[in-house]
Image (tube, rainbow, N blue to C red):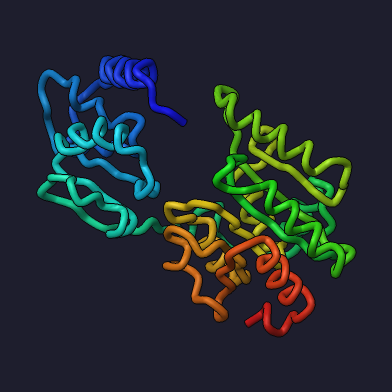
Amino acid sequence: VPFTKEMKEIFLKNNQLNEKLFEGEYDFVVIHDPQPVAILNYRQEKKGKWIWRFHIDPTNAQEKVWQLIRPFIEKHDAAIFTLKEYVKDDLKLKNIVIIPPAIDPLSPKNMDLDQEEIANIVTKYKVDPDRPIITQVSRFDPWKDPLGVIDMYRMVKREVKDVQLVLIASMANDDPEGWEYYEKTARHAGEDYDIHLLSNLNGIGNLEVNAFQRASDVIIQKSLREGFGLVITEALWKGKPVVAANVGGIPLQVDNRRTGYLVGDISECAERVIHLLKDSEIANK
């Protein structure tokens, strides 16, 4: 997508507007990702330490965009990246730290649930807990490849007839691109009642995500690009086998052939899922 002058103006204007909404004084301010990175630029007086936290993979960023945001990053006291490979060579900042994301094992999203509660939640959304379940928890976004996940599921279903697919996402009313891709995904799913598209807008919260992950036989993360993919760590914490794309921060989490499989394409993904669904002993390891 070409980065236009209009896009730059909108970016700067929104950062300036958000700076006006910034109230109070703090010892530390943490700014997340590129969208609000220029807020500090519009502060008349900088108080406290400002830290910029980058969650995504910038290695293929458009040079014009990177050169726009780089000076704003360098105004911060420190920057945190997920991987050292994500740090651009021309970034001039004294304090650069590599900190992968982490989960809270005691949170509603990761705490232990009993089997009855898991079954009740899954059944509420018309998913059969007694049949095989494949789940991907990711927003409806081209980089998360939900269309490819559906294609993979259809390949699996030829071998495992009663398998079900659950795609769980967080949706926002003010995200037209997300809705557009949700509708595209729904059209791709067609009238297959074993494909379930769920989100926060029909009651899916952290507890429900937890239940679906625990009810699943295999967790998928078929991203085309991925900064880290913390849902993989969530799944592994719950003792679930993971089949995930060999991109970004995913290989940091999946011990290939031990805690899951790293795959390259849809066919390999389907092959690994079928293997896990048909061999419960391997899956349980």
User: 253 or 264: which is nearer to us?
Assistant: 264
Please tell me which residue is depicted at 65% across the width and 34% down the height of the picture.
Answer: 181
Q: Would you identify the image quadrant in which residue 82 lies?
A: bottom left
Residue 209 coordinates in the image, percent (x, y): 63, 51
Quadrant hosting residue 243: bottom right
- Can you say which quadrant of the picture contains the C terminus? bottom right
Q: Is residue 193 above or below residue 46?
A: below
In x, y percent, where is residue 256? 53, 76
Q: Is residue 190 left or right of residue 66?
A: right
Residue 218, by quadrant, is bottom right
The residue nearer to you, when weighing 146 against 202, is 146
Above or below 206: residue 29 = above
Q: Is residue 35 shown left or right of residue 197?
A: left
Residue 118 picture location, percent across and down: 72, 58
The x, y position of residue 274, in whole percent, is 76, 72
Residue at 53% from the left image edge and 61% from the top image edge? 232
Observer-nearest of 19 and 65: 65
Total labels drawn: 0
Question: In the picture shown, does residue 90 fall above or below 269?
Answer: above
Judge left or right: residue 185 versus residue 200.
right
Considering only vertical position in the picture, is 9 above or below 29? above
User: Image check: 270 left or right of 143?
Assistant: right
Q: Residue at x 34, y 18 (%)?
A: 5
